[in-house]
Amino acid sequence: MTELSRRALLAGTAALAVAPPALASAPKAGTQVPGFYRYKVGDYELTQLSDGAATFPMPEHFITNRSKERAIQEAERLYLAPAGKITVPFSPVLINTGSKLILIDTGYGPNIGPFVGHLPANLRAAGVTPEQIDTVIISHVHPDHTNGLHNKDGSLTYPNAEIIIPDVDWAFWMDKSNAAKAKTPLTKAYFANDFKTLTDLRNAGARERVSTYAAGREVAPGITSIATPGHTPGHRSFAVASGNARIFIQSDVTNIPAFFLDHPDWHVMYDHDPMLAQATRHKFYDMAAAEKATVVGYHFPFPCVGHIEKAGSGYRLIPTAWSYAL
Ligand SMILES: [Zn+2]
C-alpha cells in the first residue's frame, strides 16, 4: 500500500514536472478584496463594513497593567500577527431600517495611511453611496471612529446626514481645562485630534445637522444607546431591536477580543479610565452572556459578529459563521 502510494506520488510528481505552469500568467491582484458582510436583525438589514486594519509593532505599554513581554507572549500564543506585532481591525456598521440608512462610526478617514480609510469604498461596494446616509451615530470621540466624518479636503463625507455625538464625550473633549490635565502623549494627541474634529464639524456648514445624544435614549428607530463608560467618558454601545430580534453593538467595550475577553482585567492603552472600563466590560459581557445575545464589536475579527460566553475567569467570543441566507 505504501509502495503503491509512493509510486502514484512519484508518477504525479513526474507529471507535474512536465506540465505547463498553468497559473504563471495570472497576474496577482496585490490588494485586498472589498470588505462587507450583510445579515438581518428582524426586519432590519445590517452590513458590517471594513475601514481597514492596522498591523504595528506592539507598543511599549499596549497593556498598561502587564509588561510588553507578557503582551507579546500572549499575542504570539493567539497567532494575532507576525512576531512582536499586533493587528487591530476597524469596522463600522450600516443599519438599513427599511426607511433610513444609519451608519454607526466612520473609521479613520483618508489621512492616516494605506491600511485604513476604506469605509467609503467598501460602502459603495455594498451598493450605498455616502450621499444616501441619513444618520451617522458616533459611539465615542476617538480618531478611529470619527476622523472619517471628513474627506481629505475637509468637506463632510456624509453630506446629507444628521450627525449625532455622545453628549458626555462632546463636553469632555471640547473642554480645554480637561486637555490641560492630559499627562501622556497619547491623551494629548486625542485632545488635539478630537477638538479639531468637533470644531471642524461645527464649522463645516452642517451645524444644524449636528447634535448630541444622551445614554438610555432611542437615538434612531429601534436603536437605543447604552452608557458603557471607561474607554472614553461618554462611550456608548447600542441595542438594535426589530420585531423579536435584538443584538448589541458593543463599540469599544474591548479592543481586540482575543486579549481582553480572555483577560477582562487587562487595560488597553486607549482606555481613558481603565478601572471604569474594566467594570463596564464585566457588566456588559455578563449581560450579553446571560441573554445569549449576538454581539458586534468594532475591533472584532471581520465580520465582527458573534456571541460571548463566560470562560474561566473571563469570557470568549464564538464568531458567527459567514452565511448567504438573509
Ligand atoms: Zn476604537
Image (cartoon, grey):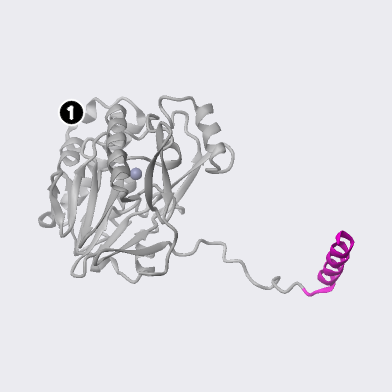
Locate residue 75 relative to residue 226 in the image: left or right.
Answer: right
**Quarter of the picture holding the N terminus:** bottom right
Q: Is residue 313 above or below residue 88?
A: above
- Residue 244: image quadrant is bottom left
**Quarter of the picture holding the C terminus:** bottom left
* Secondary structure mostly seen in the magenta stretch: helix
Instruction: Look at 43% across and 52% down and name the residue there.
Output: 319
Please provide percent x and percent y for residue 318: 43, 49
The quadrant where ligand 1 appears is top left
Please provide percent x and percent y for residue 272: 29, 32
Question: Element type at marker 1?
Answer: helix
The span picked out in magenta is 1-20
What amino acid is at disc 1? Ser
Instruction: Look at 15% across and 53% down and name the residue there.
Output: 219
Q: Is residue 319 above or below residue 187?
A: below
Q: Residues within 10 Å of mark 1 (few under 14, many from 20)?
A: few
Please provide percent x and percent y for residue 198: 20, 46
